[in-house]
Image (tube, rainbow, N blue to C red):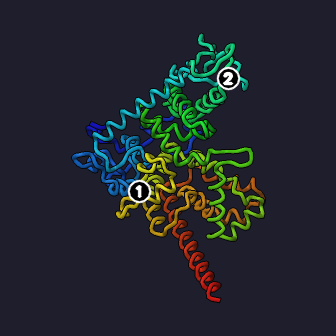
Amino acid sequence: MMMDCCTPIPEDWGEPDTFYPIRPECRNDVPASRFKPRPGKTLSARRWHASFSEEGILDIAKVLRRIQRGGVHPTIKGVVWEFLVGCYDPKSTFDERSQLREHRRQEYENLKSKCQEMDKMIGSGKIITTPVITEDGQPIEDPTSDGTASQEKVQSHDADFPVQNNVIEDKEVIQWKLTLHQIGLDVARTDRALVYYESPANQAKLWDMLAVYSWLDKDIGYCQGMSDLCSPISILLENEADGFWCFERLMRKLRGNFKCTSSSIGVRSQLTMLSSIIKAIDPKLHEHIENLDGGEYLFAFRMLMVLFRREFSFVDALYLWELIWSMEYNPNLFSMYESDASSEKSLAAVGDDNLLHYGKFERKNVQAGHKDPQATLSVFLVASVLEAKNRRLLKEAKGLDDVVKILNDITGKLDAKKACNEALKLHKKYLSKVCLLLVFFCFSLSRIWTI
């Protein structure tokens, strides 16, 4: 039987921090958590199991409503997230998902084995925090995270990769190995306040997942911020392969933010969207920000890159993410990812008459015919934060440093559900303005054609 509908787990409705304990010496350094699972509002294990038919088909509409009311109970977050990010089709059966899960686990093992052939630290239970190779492929003795040198040398590799006198010549392998120590440095810093990461094995699990992903997605590789996105998934899904594919699906939504060139950053498209939203709904604030040389909205870079991980406690960030994903949910997500077509084309090609199967944010987009992939709920969330700080920004911000300072003041003070609701209001307001502009444009065009 599938893990998504197993024997119900006894539910604890106590403090959520007990599921993700904080190291005693760090308790004063992390924001207090606001989210508390509540009977009757939060999606419980009992309600989750009751949402499946006898064959295993999930009533996703019922699940989305419950999540949007009160989040997901900590005991089932991982398996629920797999559906929210598009790992599984709600219309699939237990048997179909079981087969797919086993196939993916084997696929991950194959990927990981290939990575192990290139570097034996993969799967060793340790992480690398110093370079193991030079940019021209010269091997460096392979240090582990504890500062001691391992017995294995960096030249362990598969015969498929060209090597001359212990120098690796394959540029893709060199580029991948150059990122391993950067991943290790980030893993060592990620969520270090959690007791979970006191375990070297748990750090190594996160490092392995990110290292394998950077080999799988060579166009993006590894970028700072990915560890912040992968860490909660690694914690929630015990099986490493399951966690990896959940992270891979999340990255399908977010990878564009990490695609950088010498002249632009990937998240710039969303920052441009943010600028357009503020210009439409609050022209005065937009003009003020432009006068401060902030028209590119780079001060919102971090919020969008790591989905507000820095602005919320760990528990509240998880709650925020599942609210966002449930509100953005599109029932065609799984089929879109499984097809070879582009995401925009796939979503447009597959219809779903039952709008209840969409999250409330995506439902509004479908009804309005709005398909801008950059206009995500997280962008409207940033816009709602700026709107909430409107008076302070207009009165106190004399430069971009002041803008950053004012936005930093929100850390630990935002309520995830209220923030999402405010974002939904701004989204509705923005769509109405876009529709009015479209009507005006069409009317003007018709006048021109009749002259």
User: Residue tagged by mark 1?
Assistant: 68
Type of residue at label 2?
Glu
Residue at 45% x, 65% y is: 366
- Point out residue 98 in the picture as x, y percentages from the top left corner: 32, 37
Q: Residues within 10 Å of mark 1 (few under 14, many from 20)?
A: many
Type of residue at label 1?
Gln
Q: Secondary structure at mark 1?
A: helix
- Point out residue 119 in the picture as x, y percentages from the top left corner: 58, 21
Q: Quadrant of the N terminus?
A: top left
Quick check: 442 above or below 32?
below
Residue at 57% x, 73% y is: 433
Circles 1 and 2: CB atoms closer than 8 Å: no
**C-alpha gap between disc 1 and disc 2:** 51 Å
Q: Nearer the viewer, mark 1 or mark 2?
A: 2
Residue at 38% x, 41% y is: 79
User: Residue tagged by mark 2?
Assistant: 169
Q: Nearer the viewer, residue 92 or 166?
A: 166
